[in-house]
Amino acid sequence: MSTQSTRAAARLMVAPSVILLFIWMIVPLAMTIYFSFRLYRLLSPDRTGWVGFNNYAWFLNSPDFWVAIVNTLLLVGGVLIITVVLGILIAILIDQPIWGQGPLRILVISPFFVMPPVAASIWENLFMHPQNGLLAAASRGLGYEPILYLESYPMASVIFITAWEWLPFATLILLTALQSMSSEQMEAAEMDGASALSRFRYLVLPHLSRAITVVILIQTIFLLGIFGEIFTTTQGGPGNASTTLPYMIYKQALIAKDIGRAAAGGIIAVILANIVAVFLMRAIGKHLDA
Amino acid sequence: MARTVTTNQKITYTFFAWAVGLIIFFPVLWTILTSLKTEASAVASPPEFLGADWTLQNYADVWQRSDYPRFFWNSVIISIGSTLLGLAIAIPAAWSMAFVPGKRTKDLLMWMLSTKMMPAVGVLIPMYLLFQKTGLFDTRIGLILALMLMNLPIIVWMLYTYFKEIPGEILEAARMDGASLKNEILYVLTPMAIPGIASTMLLNIILAWNEAFWTITLTTVDAAPLSAFIASFSAPQGLFYAKLSAASTMAIAPILIVGWFSQKQLVRGLTFGAVK
Amino acid sequence: MGKITLRNVTKKFGEVAVIPSLDLDIEDGEFVVFVGPSGCGKSTLLRLIAGLEDTSGGIISIDGVDATAMPPAKRSLAMVFQSYALYPHMSVRKNIAFPLKMAGMDAAAIDKKVEGAAKVLNLTSYLERRPGQLSGGQRQRVAIGRAIVREPKAFLFDEPLSNLDAALRGNMRLEITELHQTLKTTMIYVTHDQVEAMTMADKIVVLQAGHIEQVGSPLDLYNHPANVFVAGFIGSPRMNLVTGADADAESATTIGVRPEHLDISTTAGKWAGKVSVAERLGSDTFLHVAVPGHGSMTARGAGEVALSHGDTVYLTPQSGKVHRFGADGKNLA
């Protein structure tokens, strides 16, 4: 199907994207590595020099860092569990014979299209606000004091908001996979005498495993970088209670304006992402084929 | 065993399914409702549902009496700009990978996927500094470039899966019919690829519009799109709920509507073609 | 006008030689069928002739001109694909007109030719429809129309009837044969169905693993198969092949008798066995007989034969109808 001339033309056409992505990956990464070994603060740019692993040590010795790591893992893990479990259940529910599946799908997937700052803002102001929020009003209506969600449970609140945003994605993917199941398979199982629960366990769940794998993989990529929600609501606070690794690095870079430290943090984040990726790929890579 | 679902069962399923759907959708609904109330009504306690004072004034206020339009147009320009730029680079790449695959093509695609896995914070420093030095900081061009780079892997992947679905035999038939490479692309490939390109475009506009990292970190005032605007607008002082809701609704409305029609594209694009 | 010659043509995919080295002559106006089991290289061979694949060696000549390096567009050959490969976004009219448009013909001339082809193929009322709105048989005709309109040196058919249901297949077979009789252009036809090969071909090329096993007219292959493979491939139901003592008695390693050349008797005969399955088609009956030491043999009886499962039966080959093959599989005749 290909001849010499088409092959040469093809290589030329792939080149721009490959070169761009290559530069985009290598150059900034190399620069970050470079800066991570230097003392460089934007507020006192004259004092620079090689400081070896000092920046890294600062992170590893800082209690904030370990809190950030835990928060990051909580965020990713929490959202994954909530979205996958609920996603499966809701997908199954929507797949049942119901009226108005079309409009219903539209309702269910809507949160995904709400941009993170707006999603966070809606929850923060209209719902979680201690005076004017709906949840506060509900609490008062039931005779309780309103809970200060963002102050008392900052990380849980962020996890909740993020889960609300990502639940539609998981549901949609799982619903698509569910609806691609051949009905003949299910009918054969019925004729073999399998109950609904057995059919779920032995047919549906294995079929969904590939989609679940994809959902987990894709969501993890995006969840490791969650930023807008935290920026809009808690700014990582109170204290460091809702600071994740990306947010901590952001603070070092754009607020403390400590380039060296932020760079070191960035490299740590890259390492962490790679570790997670390796784990993920090994654990569930067998379900994927490109 | 009864083959037909009884009406009772259907009613029950429908009830629960819609209940879940409405709960999930409720925050959006509440925002839209609040945007249509007067400020007083919006913060009334206990909250007013149907008996509120309704008005469209909030939309007028936000649009006319603040900087809102500027942020809105920034969002539009940045989303469409980064998408078009991305397509220009990705279409040739995806074409050649789909139709003239080499030994390395699969590896190349997986590598592109892996670049998306790198956390943005890993390159925040160099991007920030580079943008400052080259004057790209707080410019729309700068953001178009940044977002294009972020989404290029997704665009290439999505186009690749669509191109792969074009039956090779049809292109061969064109060749046998005497079409040169140029004619083959012009008369046969492109018309067949347009739905795929349109879908990719749609998905990418959504992703760019909603992006909330670079749009916040690489802008201050001039190029800030809606994401940055809302993020900083949510400050404790000066909260005007109804106006905030109106601003929010306008910020999400375009993408909500586009998104409702893009469900299939979303599934394909964000799973890198693994689920269709 | 449509003489095609292949000399030493080879095709490798990586290290694998799908076609080791092949010589073939196709005369102008012939209906040649490439037939063979899956993976034998028949489609590859067709694509090499078409120019859709590059050869790894050898020469392909069209009307005496070396076409080996020529791109498909320049070879003046038309191809009908198995999946028809119609342009889904174009109407039937535009589909058929496409090659003429690529050749730079003016619009009036194109219309005339398209309408002419449509008339021959009964497509006139479908000209404005899209392929998606047509049935399988209609799409087939559009694909053929697109090929005819170019007045090529030869038509190449790649298993064109595989996607049609049985009844339609029978009709289209006749239509293509009639087309050949009308146009008298060279046609090269690839199929795995030996019935199509036998009924349509002037010349059959039997392929296996990239080798030509035999080239000849249908009856040549039927009456004088060159080796065991061709003997077993041509003819339906399959020829009965017997080894062992019965073969030795004929000074051969393998002997073969076609089901239609076995006499059936309930009293006496060469091979005795019990009927396992009797297939009754009305016009014929095929008896599958379990013969001890020879596995299952098939015999054809005309009309209705009053034998069924479990009956004892004797089969005797008609004289002169026994084929003898040597240790290398080749026909000893």
Image: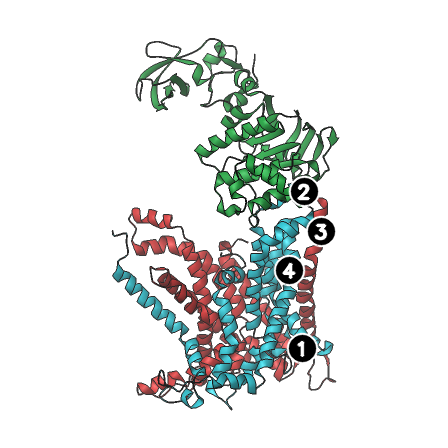
Residue that carries the numbered disc 4 in the rendered image: B90
Residue that carries the numbered disc 2 in the rendered image: B178
Residue that carries the numbered disc 3 in the rendered image: A9
Cα distance between the residues tagged 1 and 3: 35 Å
Chain C, colour shown: green
The mark that comes first in sequence, 2 or 4, is: 4
The mark that comes first in sequence, 2 or 1, is: 1
Task: Establish whether labels 2 and 3 are both on one chain.
Answer: no
- The residue marked by circle 1 belongs to what chain? B
Residue that carries the numbered disc 1 in the rendered image: B139
Image position of C160 with respect to A215: above or below: above
Label 4 amino acid?
Answer: Ala
| Residue C235 on image: x %, y % | 49, 22
Task: Establish whether labels 1 and 3 are both on one chain.
Answer: no
Label 2 amino acid?
Answer: Gly
Q: Nearer the viewer, residue B275 or B68?
A: B68
